[in-house]
Amino acid sequence: MRLGLLILFGVFAAILSLSIGALPIPLADLTPALFGRGDDIHITIMQDLRAPRTLLALVIGAGLGASGAALQGYTRNPLADPGILGFSATAALGAVLALYFGHRLWITPAALAGAGIGAALLLAMAGRRQSATVLILAGVGIGSLATALTGLLMNFAPNPWALSEIVYWLMGSLKNASYDGAVISGSLTLTGLLLLFWIGPDLRALSLGEDTAKSLGVPLGRLRVFLVLGVALCVGAGVAVAGAIGFIGLFIPHILRAIFGPDPARLIPLSALGGAGFLALADSLTRVLSVNGTVMYLGILSALIGAPFFIWLAFRAGRS
């Protein structure tokens, strides 16, 4: 029953994302427009704008949700976030470098390269130590350095237009979604999701403690490598095409854990489904709130939704 409701939520969010916009498309016209039939305006809007945007929202949301659930399982901390390993920051740094030098066409490959470099640095810094604490410390350090370098580039932006372009990109948005971006992000995210799904049973054993996991035959070194690569692919692919979008990997697994339980092997795919639906719904809301030429950015909206949720959690914990 609960799984069925979660699936219905994802389907509802996708349909809403396809239909809502400056020119709403009636539900009866969605499928014909998607396959090139019906009103020419609806066909153009659907095939060139709504379909790739919705697809990207579902893909990126799935990657962020699953990454958060996997990291929370690995660290055994329900408040862990994909950004804790620094991949969001290093991917953003790569994209900002491309914008700084005026090469917009290089944003996606530069962001992916940034995420890859971040993953390589993280594994190198963590060394052979299999402790989650060491991995987190290395990730926080890498992320902080990447954030500082991003700020430095903004400080020395060659002109106000370059600075504004960097700032708006960092806010996160799907308004420039395309099928090319969806294919690139989708293929990388799918690879990352498969890695995270693969390590789910090992994370379940790890929840009993590292010593117990070792005694059960869990290869902690391989687990860490797969985790880092899976999160880097999911997060890097999202940042590369949509900019910085936070909080999804933090509160979606947290909510679903209260509904479905803490088992990481189950929570990772459920969080992928929940994250996909949430981001599609949030992107629809940005279109509703973007009026009179003012754009509501997806990264801002996700933070506005996510931050109060954790303030409420802190308030409830303080009173209990």
Image (tube, helix red, strand yellow):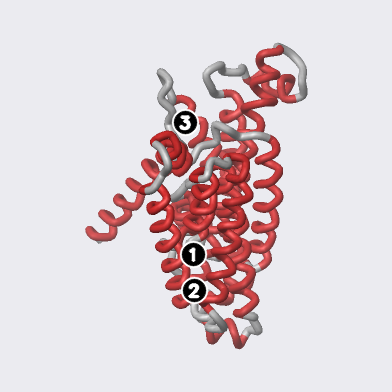
Q: Is residue 179 above or below residue 230?
A: above
Who is closer to the viewer here, 299 or 308?
299
Name the kind of residue labelled 3 in the image: Leu
Q: Residue furthest left?
A: 319
Few, some or many C-alpha atoms within 10 Å of disc 2 (few <14, some 14-19, many ≥20)?
A: many
Tell me the residue that label 2 is attached to.
135
Quadrant occupied by the C terminus: bottom left
CB under 8 Å between discs 2 and 3: no
Who is closer to the viewer here, 268 or 49?
49
Instruction: Find numbered disc 3 in the image and state the secondary structure of the residue it sits on.
Output: helix
Residue 285: mark: 3
Q: How far, Cα to Cα, is label 2 from label 3?
A: 36 Å
Tell me the residue that label 1 is attached to.
85
Q: Is residue 316 above or below residue 302?
A: below
Q: Earlier in the sequence, mark 1 or mark 2?
A: 1
- The quadrant in which residue 318 appears is bottom left
